[in-house]
Structures are given as C-alpha cells and as structure tokens.
C-alpha cells in the first residue's frame, strides 16, 4: 500500500525527517509513537503534501505511485486521507456543501458521476449517526463553533464518506475525553478493511487500547528507531521514550 | 511558514469577457465643450428643454472639480480625451425587434453567457439592451404595456412621456449633485426608463445588460425608475466589457422614485473589465445611484461588484416618508490592482424609518477595497433604526480592506447599530479543502461564496447563480 524509503524533509531549513523507512501492506494498522518534536506530525504533512514541508530526499509511493510530485488534492483523490490534529474552521461554507464538493471531487477522479443531492444527504446523515453527530452539524459552517470532540468526529465522518485507501490520523486522540475517544475508535474500527491501511500517529498508548495496531513504530529524531507489535506501546507507556532517544543518538554517532 | 506562496500563485486570471465585437461604429471625435452637448442632443432629436437642461449641467460641471476623498488612486482623467458619443452604424435603420438585431451583437451576448431571446423567453425577462450608447431592442414591451408598465430607452421616453421625464429627471440626483453626476447630466447617452402605474405589480423582472465596446468611449447611462403608489418592481442590471488597454470612463446616474406604499428592488451585477494583472487598463466607474422613498415605501439595492479598475459608487436611500425602508446589500470583490470605494448613504428623514446595510468586501491580489457609508438620522426621524454590518475578507497579504462608517444622529430616539469584521482566507483552510480532494480554485470560490451568502440570497434567482459564477471567474488565479 505505502512504501516510504529513506524519506528526508525539512521545515524552514530545519531537518525534521532524516531517513525514514516504512512499509505498510493493505489492511494493516501502523501506530507511530514518539516524543514531542520527533517528526510525527511532519510525516503526515509531508505525505499529504502540505506547503512549507520540503522533501530533500527519499521516496514515498502509494500503491506504486510516487506521491511526492503530486498536488495535495491529487494525493487525496488517490485515496490518501489525513485526519487533522487541529481541524480548521471555514465559516459560511456549510459542512454538507463542503462534504459534497469533497466526495464529488474524489468520485470524479475515479471516473464516477457526482451523487445527486438527495442521495448524498441521505448518506451524510447516516454517517453522522455513526459518529454520534447531530444532523444539524451538516448545516453548520465547516467546524464552525464545533467543540474539540465534535471537530474530531467530523473528521472521522469525512473519512467514512471518502472511503480512502490510506488513512493517517494525526494525534486524533489529543484533547478527546474518553467517550469521544471511543466514538472515534469505533469509527476507525468500522472502516478496517483488507484493502485499507491506517497510520495512527499518537503520543499516548490510550488510543491503542481501542484501535489495536498490527505494528508500533517509535519515531525519534527523524527516524524510526524501534518497531514492534502492539506490546511495544505498553512498554513505551511504562518506560517512556528517553531510552530509545539515547539509543538513536548513540546509533547515529 | 510560506504563508502566502500558495495564495500568490493563483492571483491573476484572464478576463473571460475580453473580446471585441467587430461592428462598425460611428463615434464622435474626443473632446467636450458646449458643441458636444448640442451635438448629442441634436443627434437624439431632443426637445429644447432637454438641451437647456444638459447645458445647465455642463455649465455647472465646468465649475466643479473631481472629488478626491475616495480611497482610490488614479491618474487625472483628461476629459477632452474622451469621446462622448458612439453608436453602432446600423442605427439609421434601427431594428424593431430582437430578430432584426445584428446577429453579431447577439453573438456577443451569447459569448457572455446571455442568450438574449432564450433567456428572455424562458425566464420571462424583458431585456432592454444598451450596446454602446444606443438601445437596440426591447422585448416584452407589449406584455408590459398591457399592465400599463412603461419600460423603454430613456431617449424614447423623452419623446413619448416628456411630462414624466421632465418631472422626475434630476429630482433625486440634481444636475449639480456631484462632479460625475453633472458630467452625466450634460452628456448622458441613453439608459432605461421605467414607470409602474398605481397599484401595479410589474409582471416580470426588468433587466438591462450594458456593454462598453468602443475605444476611448465614455458611456453615460441615465436610468430613471418611478414606482407610483402601491406598485412593485424588480429591476436587474448587469454589465461586462471587452478587454482594453486604455482606461475607460464610465459615469452613470440612476434615480429611483418610490411613491407611497410602493417597492423598488434594484439589483446590479457589475463585471466591467478590471484591468490586467499588471494593473493596466480597466474601466473607471463613477456612479451616482440614489432613491427617494415616500411613506411606507421600500427601496432595496443589491449589488455584486467584481469589475472595473476603479469603482466609486454609493447607492443611497433618502427615507423621506414615515415608515419607509431602505436596504443595501453589497458584495464588492477586488483582485490584482483594482480599487473599490463603495458603500451607501441612508438618510432618515421620516418617522420610524428603517434601514439595513449588509456589505461583504473581498480583497485579493494587490487590490484595495473600501466600504464608505453614511447613516444620517434627521431631526424628524423619531423611532428610526439602522443596522449596519460590514464584513471584509482578505485573500493573500498584499491587499487592503478599509471601513469608513459615518454616523450622524440628530434625533435622540433613533437607534444606529454598526458591526464590522475582518477575516482572511488562510492556507490552513485551503489545505483542508485540498486534502479532501478539492482544488484551490474551487476551494476559494466556495469560501468566498459562503462569505457572501447573506447578500446573494437577496438577488433574484437567475442573478444569484450568475453572481456565484462571476466571483469564481473573478477570483480565478487569486490563490495557488
């Protein structure tokens, strides 16, 4: 599904990713953990093509297609989805209008006709229900006045509507209470599919109690310094990251 | 971060309506003096009183100086360099219906997405086309005539309804009102005349499409709309112009008279050539639009202004009668080097008069967009109310938005409310859209349309769609 080789990237002249390798097969869930400033969010931003993140080396391919030369919208249309850590508000643009534009764009890239308004509304309402958002949220401006939890659920709803191939969740658990966390996790679990992969970027092990990963990677100092199964997350919870960071630095020197 | 790199890339899109129709035109040599005024009047076979009226305006204009208080910058206009009259050559044997209109003219409108006969027939719109200075055809005049509605070029109304023209022309915007109004009064070319008799609800939306098409030609429309007691009319005006290198002068005057218990809704979509991405060319648009509302009457101005290099325009309401209502809904969009100084004046004279002002200014590129508005409560305006909301949206970081609200209240019981906001289309918003598969042009258009929603819902249906499209076209290249 996703193959990342020796990926290097910088932000404002500062090297953040320093040779990252990752191979994700269809149907797998990979958790990326690590200390603050390790480059966790940068990975999601680089993969999705956010401006300001300069790739200085390496490659990233989604189903064999080179991602790094594509515009962000082209990557999205290929099936790459980023659930934002801090979803931004777009006042005046209704959630429904935004969602329809989004789904229509992705469908168009797949050679499909746009959905008619009635079918789309039906579909959107159904997805709202799944993430426990009231239908009135469809009429409101995108994320406008939403609480932190509502914004995250809105992100998951978008993910459900777009049915992406690769979902990247960037610290989706930050700022969520336990109920909202469960809703988000259920949403993600309902999308688990042999043809869909996930990257779950998180700081805490807590989310992984609900979304059980196949692999856990520790990102420190711009590289993956340790990979393991779900038990690695528990170990990290217990021991923290310092021992791995030290190891990484020693390894690098 | 590279905050505006994304935004900068898209600023600067070609003007879609930029083409010139190959129709031979008879154009008066540039220059302005008393003879020019006499020539125009004679060419139109005007009665003596109207010539006198024009000459009086010209005499006043000569003594006046152009206003310099607006937040716009342009080179001094040499009024002797402007041609004050032009007409398509086929004028001498003027077509009596649209079927007789030069097919090339009609093709011009179709290029603009305005298939005249289709649209007229399907939408039930009577269209009075002003091509350069001469009205070429009027449709549906018969249906309107049955209702007693008079809708014709003002040049014809001068002959057919001289008593109405004489009584009302200049009654709201006097000849000496301001520099550009005086100029217009002296050399006005043509425009529309509407009279709705007592108690009549105009059976269709009235609409005019203007188009400037002669090099160095100023166009000076004059529109006069009279709604007699208890009548109702909705008037639509839309404009685009072909691509030009030289600045073109445009100074229109619109007068609305809303008698007791009547209602006038005046909607404008203005899309004149704004100049290129270097700030070269474009129309100078100096417009005086004013309405007087008598007892219980209501006047509503809605405008979508996306064109012109310079816009200087303040559609206003004199709320003379008790309980009269004035509304102003405006979207003004500037891109590249455009400058707009636009707003309204609400003059409350009668008791319990009410006014609402909702404006949305969108600035992109290196443009400057100003709202200038006056709310005046006269001593007699007991219980009067005004609500003003001015919102500005910035796209990129090289443009400017300015708000100049003036409030004068001479009646302690009058209430004036003013709210203003400024926001920015952020790279984060654009990235969210892109990450969801929406390209930046569509994203900007969506965000801007969302911002303008409150005003668009005031537009007649067919205009609302056109307006949304127009914003999209005008902003193409403003981001990315």
Image: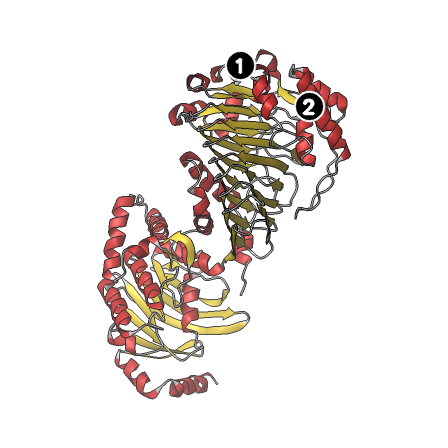
Judging from the image, mark 2 belongs to the subunit labelled B
Q: Nearer the viewer, residue A120 or B12?
A: A120
Q: Is residue A234 visible?
A: yes
Say which of marks 1 and 2 sits in front.
Answer: 2
Residue at position x 51%, y 48% in the image:
B360
Residue at position x 46%, y 44% in the image:
B455
Tell me the CA gap for discs 1 and 2.
Answer: 29 Å
Q: Mark 1 vs mark 2: which is more N-terminal?
A: 2
* Crowding near the residue tagged with mark 1, few <14, some 14–19, many ≥20 C-alpha atoms within 10 Å: some
Q: Which residue is mark 2?
A: B53
* Structure colour scheme: secondary structure
Q: Nearer the viewer, residue B394 or B408?
A: B408
x%, y% of residue A97? 36, 50
Q: How many marks?
A: 2
Judging from the image, mark 1 belongs to the subunit labelled B
x%, y% of residue B116? 46, 25
Picture quadrant of residue B224:
top right
Apparent side of residue A90 relative to residue B153 in the rendered image (left or right)? left
x%, y% of residue B369? 59, 49
x%, y% of residue B65? 75, 38
Q: Give SS at disc 1.
A: loop
Q: Nearer the viewer, residue B298 or A58?
A: B298
Apparent side of residue B11 relative to residue B76 in the rendered image (left or right)? left
Q: Which residue is mark 1?
A: B95
């Amino acid at each position: 599904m996703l193959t990342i080789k020796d990926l290097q990237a910088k932000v404002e002249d500062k090297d953040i990713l320093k040779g990252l390798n990752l191979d994700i097969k269809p149907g797998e869930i990979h958790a990326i953990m690590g200390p603050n400033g390790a480059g966790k969010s940068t990975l999601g931003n680089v993969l999705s093509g956010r401006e300001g993140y300069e790739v200085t080396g390496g490659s990233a391919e989604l189903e064999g297609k080179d991602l790094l030369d594509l515009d962000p919208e082209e990557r999205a249309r290929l099936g790459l989805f980023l659930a934002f850590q801090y979803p931004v508000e777009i006042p005046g643009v209704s959630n429904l209008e935004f969602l329809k534009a989004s789904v229509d764009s992705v469908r168009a890239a797949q050679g499909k006709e746009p959905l008619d308004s009635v079918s789309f509304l039906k579909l959107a309402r159904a997805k709202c229900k799944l993430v426990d958002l009231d239908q009135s949220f469809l009429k409101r401006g995108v994320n406008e006045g939403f609480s932190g939890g509502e914004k995250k659920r809105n992100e998951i709803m978008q993910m459900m509507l777009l049915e992406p191939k690769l979902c990247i969740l960037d610290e989706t658990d930050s700022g969520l209470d336990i109920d909202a966390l469960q809703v988000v996790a259920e949403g993600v679990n309902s999308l688990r599919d042999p043809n869909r992969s996930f990257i779950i970027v998180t700081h805490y092990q807590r989310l992984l109690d609900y979304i059980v990963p196949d692999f856990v990677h520790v990102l420190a100092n711009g590289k993956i310094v340790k990979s393991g199964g779900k038990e690695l997350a528990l170990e990290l919870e217990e021991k923290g990251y310092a021992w791995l960071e030290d190891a990484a630095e020693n390894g690098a020197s | 971060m590279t905050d505006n790199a994304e935004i900068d890339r898209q600023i600067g899109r070609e003007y879609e309506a930029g083409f010139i129709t190959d129709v031979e035109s008879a154009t008066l040599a540039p220059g302005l003096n008393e003879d020019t005024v006499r020539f125009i009047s004679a060419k139109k076979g005007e009665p003596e009183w109207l010539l006198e009226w024009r000459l009086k305006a010209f005499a006043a204009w000569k003594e006046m100086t152009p206003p310099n208080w607006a937040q716009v910058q342009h080179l001094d206009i040499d009024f002797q360099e402007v041609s004050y009259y032009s007409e398509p050559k086929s004028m001498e044997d003027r077509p009596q219906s649209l079927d007789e209109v030069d097919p090339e003219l009609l093709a011009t409108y179709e290029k603009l997405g305005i298939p005249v006969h289709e649209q007229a027939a399907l939408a039930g719109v009577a269209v009075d086309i002003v091509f350069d200075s001469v009205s070429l055809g009027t449709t549906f005049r018969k249906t309107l005539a049955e209702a007693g509605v008079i809708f014709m070029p003002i040049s014809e109304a001068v002959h057919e309804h001289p008593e109405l023209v004489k009584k009302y022309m200049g009654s709201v915007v006097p000849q000496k009102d301001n520099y550009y109004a005086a100029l217009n009064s002296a050399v006005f070319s043509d425009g529309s005349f509407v009279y709705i008799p007592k108690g009549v609800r105009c059976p269709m939306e009235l609409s005019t499409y203007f188009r400037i098409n002669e090099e160095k030609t100023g166009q000076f429309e004059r529109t006069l709309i009279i709604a007699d007691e208890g009548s109702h009319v909705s008037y639509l005006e839309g404009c685009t112009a072909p691509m030009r290198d030289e600045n073109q002068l445009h100074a229109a005057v619109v007068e609305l008279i809303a008698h007791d218990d009547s209602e006038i809704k005046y909607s404008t979509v203005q899309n004149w050539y704004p100049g290129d991405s270097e700030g070269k060319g474009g129309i100078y648009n100096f417009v005086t639009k004013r309405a007087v509302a008598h007892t219980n009457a209501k006047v509503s101005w809605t405008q979508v202004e996306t064109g012109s290099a310079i816009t200087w325009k303040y559609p206003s309401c004199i709320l003379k009668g008790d309980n009269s209502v004035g509304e102003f809904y405006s979207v003004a969009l500037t891109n590249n080097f455009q400058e707009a100084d636009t707003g309204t004046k609400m003059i409350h004279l009668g008791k319990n008069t009410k006014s609402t002002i909702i404006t949305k200014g969108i600035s992109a590129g290196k443009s400057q967009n100003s709202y200038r508005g006056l709310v005046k409560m006269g001593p007699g305006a007991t219980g009067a109310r005004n609500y003003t909301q001015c919102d500005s949206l910035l796209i990129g970081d090289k443009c400017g938005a300015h708000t100049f609200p003036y409030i004068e209240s001479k009646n302690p019981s009058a209430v004036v409310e003013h709210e203003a906001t400024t926001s920015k289309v952020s790279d984060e918003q654009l990235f969210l859209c892109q990450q969801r598969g929406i390209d930046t042009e569509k994203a900007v258009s969506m965000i801007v349309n969302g911002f303008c929603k409150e005003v668009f819902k005031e537009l007649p249906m067919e205009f609302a769609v056109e307006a949304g499209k127009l914003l999209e076209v005008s902003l193409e290249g403003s981001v990315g």
